[in-house]
Image (cartoon, rainbow, N blue to C red):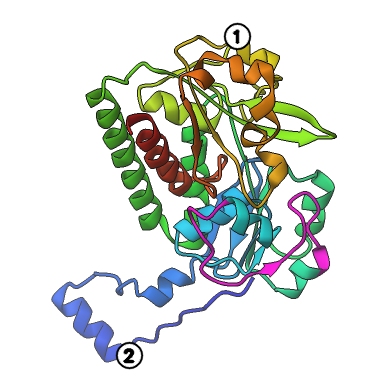
């Protein structure tokens, strides 16, 4: 590792002068000295990650990590599926034109190596074999993408860890303060509209071979956790997975939702297969008979809010959901 070595030379006369006046104060810790100390972190796997100093050239293999970097004022030099990020996460847009390193599941090792990064932030969803290859290129900071036991806590744990690696802890704290203020504002607005305790069912859906699959965001999901922080009640009864808190159901499964449920979703005009609610289901007899559909309580939220993102995406989600429910 490259380290800046600081040397100091003190003349005999100066030493005598200091001794005479009883001065024992150490030399000032200059910014150059601080930069020389290096950084040692423990990532989500328990591995020690050592850096020469705050990472500047960073590659990210997952979109929530990309969003964290942008939030912290760090423009990533490499991003997995740049086009996809620009489609699904416009709430926290890229400010530069990073190199596309391939897909989120299979990043290109050659492309990443060509960028000579200081740090690679890798998702815990990435195969171990891929992470092993990445470690041959640069230090790798593995991030636990999700935890249904505490999604909001995990979101900030990830942000704080990346902030320590990039020397941007002040911006991480600012992001936390902003998010907490947005939650408080949204909760107050909903309570003022007598909507606290309202049942909410958030989902996304996909069309494969003309078959509609619906994915409920249970209380263990990040979206579900934010909904509950706003004082809303998660209406889903299905069980979510232990990482992302996502369930599975079909159109018939929606009949199990309480009658007074509000239904919300995020589709994407850039990905037609991701929005069956405004497509195939419009003529589906089961869908059109649902109480929340009849009552006009189906809310399509704006495109570009990444449901698995960071505090920036969640703030955009809060604005969108509160606005939809109180309009």
User: Mark 2 against mark 1, which lies toward the viewer?
Assistant: 1
The disc placed on residue 140 is none
Query: Which quarter shows the C terminus?
Result: top left
In the image: residue 322, left or right of residue 42: left
Where residue 9 sits, quadrant-wise, is bottom left
Q: Was residue 136 drawn as part of the magenta stretch in this picture?
A: no
Q: Which element type, helix, strand or loop, lies under badge 2?
A: loop
The disc placed on residue 11 is 2
Seen at 26% across and 90% down, the residue is 13
Seen at 39% across and 21% down, the residue is 232
Main secondary structure along the magenta-highlighted residues: loop
Query: Which quarter shows the N terminus?
Result: bottom right
Q: What is the x, y in percent for residue 132?
A: 80, 52
Residues rendered magenta in the picture: 89-110
Res 4 seen here? yes
Which residue is at the front of the view, 300 or 131? 300
Location of residue 206 with respect to 102 vertically, above or below: above
């Amino acid at each position: 590792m490259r380290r800046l070595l600081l040397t100091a030379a003190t003349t005999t006369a100066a030493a005598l002068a200091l001794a005479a006046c009883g001065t024992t104060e150490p030399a000032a810790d200059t910014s150059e000295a601080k930069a020389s100390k290096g950084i040692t972190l423990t990532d989500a796997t328990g591995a020690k990650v050592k850096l020469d100093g705050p990472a500047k050239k960073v590659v990210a293999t997952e979109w929530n990590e990309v969003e964290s970097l942008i939030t912290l004022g760090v423009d990533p030099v490499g991003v997995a599926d740049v086009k996809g990020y620009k489609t699904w996460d416009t709430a926290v847009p890229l400010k530069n034109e990073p190199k596309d390193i391939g897909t989120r599941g299979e990043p290109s090792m050659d492309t990443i190596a060509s960028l000579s990064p200081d740090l690679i932030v890798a998702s815990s969803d990435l195969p171990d074999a891929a992470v092993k290859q990445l470690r041959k290129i640069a230090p790798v900071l593995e991030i636990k993408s999700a935890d249904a036991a505490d999604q909001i806590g995990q979101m900030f744990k990830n942000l704080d860890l990346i902030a320590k690696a990039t020397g941007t802890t002040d911006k991480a704290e600012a992001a936390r303060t902003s998010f907490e203020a947005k939650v408080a504002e949204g909760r107050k607005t909903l309570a003022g509209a007598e909507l606290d305790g309202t049942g909410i069912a958030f989902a996304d859906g996909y069309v494969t071979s003309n078959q509609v699959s619906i994915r409920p965001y249970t209380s263990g999901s990040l979206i579900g956790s934010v909904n509950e922080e706003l004082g809303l009640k998660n209406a889903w009864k299905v069980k979510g997975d232990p990482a992302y808190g996502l369930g599975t159901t079909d159109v018939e499964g929606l009949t199990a939702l309480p009658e007074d449920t509000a239904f919300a979703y995020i589709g994407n005009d850039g990905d037609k297969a991701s929005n069956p609610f405004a497509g195939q289901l419009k003529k589906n007899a089961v869908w059109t008979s649902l109480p929340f559909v009849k009552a006009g309580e189906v809310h399509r939220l704006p495109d570009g809010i990444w449901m698995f993102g960071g505090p920036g995406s969640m703030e955009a989600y809060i604005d969108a959901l509160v606005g939809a429910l109180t309009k």
